[in-house]
Image (cartoon, rainbow, N blue to C red):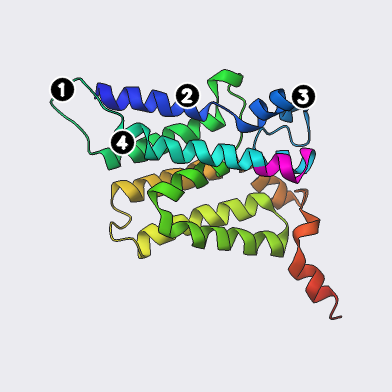
Amino acid sequence: MIELAVKLILAYLLGSVMGGLVLGRLTGASDLRSSGSGNAGATNALRTHGKAFGVTVLAIDALKGALAVAVIPWLPWPILESTVLPERWIALACGVAVTVGHIAPVFFSFAGGKGAATLLGVCLVAIPAAVPWALLSFALVLTLTGYAGLSTLVAALIIVFYVACIAASGLLSPLGAFALAMFALVVWTHRSNILRMLQGSESRFERVMIWRRMLGTRH
């Protein structure tokens, strides 16, 4: 199991490379953790630093998720072990590790993002057929409600439904365990958003609520 441990550490360290914080230092932009919501992820980057910065952060964070699943599990391992896990299982474990690294990055005092962009990159490799459905649900909920947190929660739940109802492996499988674990992690990282939504104090992306504006023009 040494191979698994080493590759999980590599995935975690890759996740700890925060796109928003690295890009901020390279461009001289303010630290995301001291702006807006104080979160180091793509959503806060978009809100506080503009579209170009936010999209770049999203791309970086998604790319590291994809690399953790597509590359790290298949790195050659020179030490023979009596028990070797299949690479696809190691890939899912690395997907969890890179997401945790993004949420609690060792390079940035364990203060990172909420994991959505990195998880998107992981799913693009691990469950690619589910991603269009997740993105569609994210866009629909976001344009209806303006709540980015709610949109992320719904998208993560769609991934679980896809694995349970459409994927050949089903929910009682390593892929199912991964989908459930990631949904639970998304709920945990968005717990403050959930509380604010229940209290009616959660901020909205008003400018993306196109359905509300379209329906409003009809009255």
- Mark 3–mark 1 contact, CB under 8 Å? no
Q: Which residue is depicted at the point 48% across and 56% down?
A: 131
- State how far apart marks 2 and 1 are (Cα): 24 Å
Residue 190 horizontal side relative to residue 170, left or right = right
Residue sitting nearer the eye, 112 or 55 = 55
For image coordinates 67% across by 59% down, the residue present is 142
Q: Which mark is residue 90?
A: 4
Q: Which residues are magenta?
A: 49-55
Q: Which one is earlier in the sequence, the residue at label 3 or at label 4?
A: 3
Q: Earlier in the sequence, mark 3 or mark 2?
A: 2
Query: What x and y, as percent, mark residue 176?
Result: 35, 51
Outermost residue to the bottom:
218
Disc nearest the viewer among 4 and 1:
1
Q: Where does the image place residue 90, in percent across and percent down from the top left?
A: 30, 36
Question: Does dot 2 land on a helix, a strand or a loop?
Answer: helix
| Left or right of 141, for residue 125 | left
Inspect the image, locate mark 4, and give the three-letter code of the amino acid beneath it.
Ile
The circle drawn on residue 80 is: 1
Would residue 137 be seen by someone viewing this image from the given angle? yes
Q: Indicate which disc, 3 or 1, sits on the residue closer to the N terminus.
A: 3
- Residue 28 image label: 3
Residue 129 location (% of width, % of height) = 41, 59
To which quarter of the image does residue 102 belong? top right
